Amino acid sequence: MATTALERKALFKAAVTLRELTMAEAAAMLGVSYNHLTLVLRGERTGSARLVREIAEFVGRDARSLFDGRPQGTAQQDTTTTDAATREGSDKTV
């Protein structure tokens, strides 16, 4: 079963507490800023494959179950506007 963002953040905080670290220290260990780490944990920003793997290792979980096997924080893009803009651009002569 997939882990929710709230559960993921709680798991990470528990792992941080067990290691007697702060969230900022854990972020530094992972090579990212505190802000970026919390955004990835909440699912509001996509983490790199390396970061996702390291977060999973840090909490002792499988990356796929921890992040549901999908990039986090990425809403499905509305391609209607993008496609229209592309078509308009392709109609122009050079």
Image (cartoon, grey):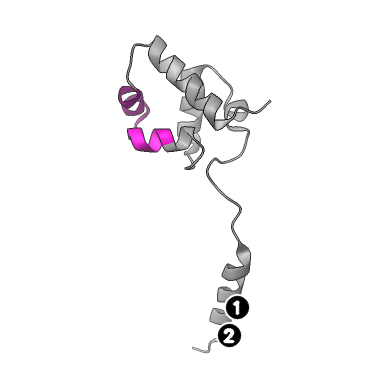
Marker disc for residue 87: 1
Q: Three-letter amino acid code at disc 1?
A: Arg
Query: In which quadrant of the rendered view does residue 87 lie?
Result: bottom right
Is 27 a magenta residue?
Answer: yes
Q: Position of residue 18 (x, y in %)?
A: 41, 10
Is 39 a magenta residue?
Answer: no
Nearest the viewer among 93 and 56 is: 56
- Neighbours of disc 1 within 10 Å: few (<14), some (14-19), many (20+): few
Mark 2 secondary-structure assignment: helix
Q: Is residue 35 left or right of residue 6?
A: left
Relative to 77, is 80 above or below?
below
Q: Residue at x 44, y 15 (%)?
A: 15
Nearest the viewer among 45 and 28 is: 45
Relative to 91, is 48 above or below?
above
Q: Residue at x 57, y 68 (%)?
A: 82
Specify the quadrant that holds the N terminus: top right
Q: Position of residue 56 (x, y in %)?
A: 51, 24
* For the residues bearing labels 2 and 1, Cβ distance under 8 angstroms: yes
Q: Residue at x 52, y 43 (%)?
A: 73
Relative to 39, is 6 above or below?
above
Q: Position of residue 35 (x, y in %)?
A: 35, 37
- Magenta extent: 23-38
* Residue receiving disc 2: 91
Mark 1 secondary-structure assignment: helix
Q: How many marks?
A: 2
Marker disc for residue 59: none
